[in-house]
Amino acid sequence: MDEEGSKFIYRSNKKEVDTRFVALGRLMYRFIKLFKRHDYGTYQTLKAVFEQQFTVTADKTVLPKDNDDISAKSIQSPHDTDSHYRNKGGKRVKGYSANITETCDDAPKDSEGQPDDSDRQPLNLVTDVNLDVVSTPDCDFLEPSIEETQKLLDDKIEKVYADGAYNSTETQDYANENDIDLILTGIQGQPPRYELTLSEENPDELIVLDTKTQIIITACLAATTKIDSQTGKPVKKWRIKTDDGKYRYFTIEDVRTSMLRQKLRDVPIREKWKRNNVEATIFQLGYNLTNGKTRYRGLAANRLWAYSRVTWINFRRILKYVMQASKRSLSSQKRHCFSIKKWICFENNVNSLINNFLNNSRLKYLNFSYF
């Protein structure tokens, strides 16, 4: 409290830090009691941090909470109280998470459904950007993003490509209800030893393949007292006897996940590659950011930044598509209104005008979004 934070962190050991952390909690508790009549502004932030990090016993003793009791939605910075944290793949990240949805149509086809011989490339645009706190699970983005995208398209969405983080029971049910083929690049976690398949003849019979021994086992329904809250019926559970004489149980979720893994295993690799294109879009979105750090504070300001950036990405794609179409038209009709040199000058002038427009608009936009 009498010196800079960096000196305190690097010189103190864990025991000293824990001791001073308790002293800091007592000081915060004193401030909260002292200024409780001025419950606005930074007081609310201080009070929220205290309640998230400390607890007060019956005898007014201030104690720090265990790490497991601290929510991922706790305040991470006094300068950005909207920011959350998340442990993703063993890496702790703070701030916000952006989800990008874009079309991925193939090259144009002729009347017989064969690929067009022309060099035309499809115009694929970003249809939705959803930015939220980083504690939001990836699978929560899928349904609203598809709904927003469908509003912009004339044709019904047939396929959705995503990575394994978007897999959940809810997303699978949503895809099935809307006749959408949800193609995942993989499923989180290591493949289990047993592959599960429901019998077509008897839905209560489960066929289990031991991938280690390649032996097929028929699992039987196990007695259970757990009742499904939605259907009011007993929850199905199967069991097999393992080599060591113990029972191995499988739930309906285990069956669904295993069957999904088998389905994705048969998807051609080129079909899975389509999802990779969105990585380039994510790169374009955060190109101006350093080490993934946003320049803005607050959820609203970061959302406005994402909307503005995605608008710029679409604008550039449309411009490139139109200019390429114009070049093809001039070449096919053999009416070169400009020489190659003049055309390059024309394209550079257009790009310069666009960049000037975006820069001027961006300054006005930043001022607006900041306030």
Image (cartoon, rainbow, N blue to C red):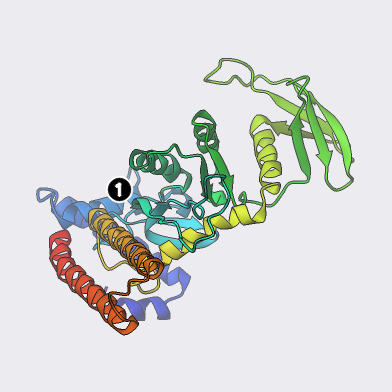
Within-10-Å neighbours for mark 1: few <14, some 14–19, many 20+: few
Query: Taking 143 as reference, is 270 left or right?
Result: right
At x 47%, y 59%, the residue is 278
Name the residue nearer the viewer: 345 or 47. 345
Tell me the quadrant of the picture where the N terminus can be found: bottom left
Q: Where is residue 260 in the image (x, y as percent from the top left)?
A: 65, 40
Residue 2 visible in this rendered orientation of the protein: no
Residue 105 visible in this rendered orientation of the protein: yes
Name the residue nearer the viewer: 315 or 64. 315
Name the residue nearer the viewer: 348 or 208. 348
Residue 359: quarter of image = bottom left
Quick check: 30 above or below 224? below
Quick check: 360 above or below 173? below
Tell me the quadrant of the picture where the C terminus can be found: bottom left
Q: Which amino acid does label 1 sit on?
A: Lys
At x 13%, y 65%, the residue is 364
Quick check: 3 above or below 265? below
At x 77%, y 26%, the residue is 199
The residue at the far left in this view is 37
Q: Where is residue 92 in the image (x, y as percent from the top left)?
A: 47, 62
Quick check: 335 above or below 315? below
Query: Taking 132 as reference, is 78 left or right?
Result: left
The residue at the far top in this view is 232
At x 52%, y 36%, the residue is 180
Name the residue nearer the viewer: 343 or 330. 330
The residue at the far front in this view is 334
Pointer 1: what residue?
60
Q: Position of residue 60 (x, y in %)?
A: 30, 48
Give the structural element (helix, strand or loop) at label 1. loop
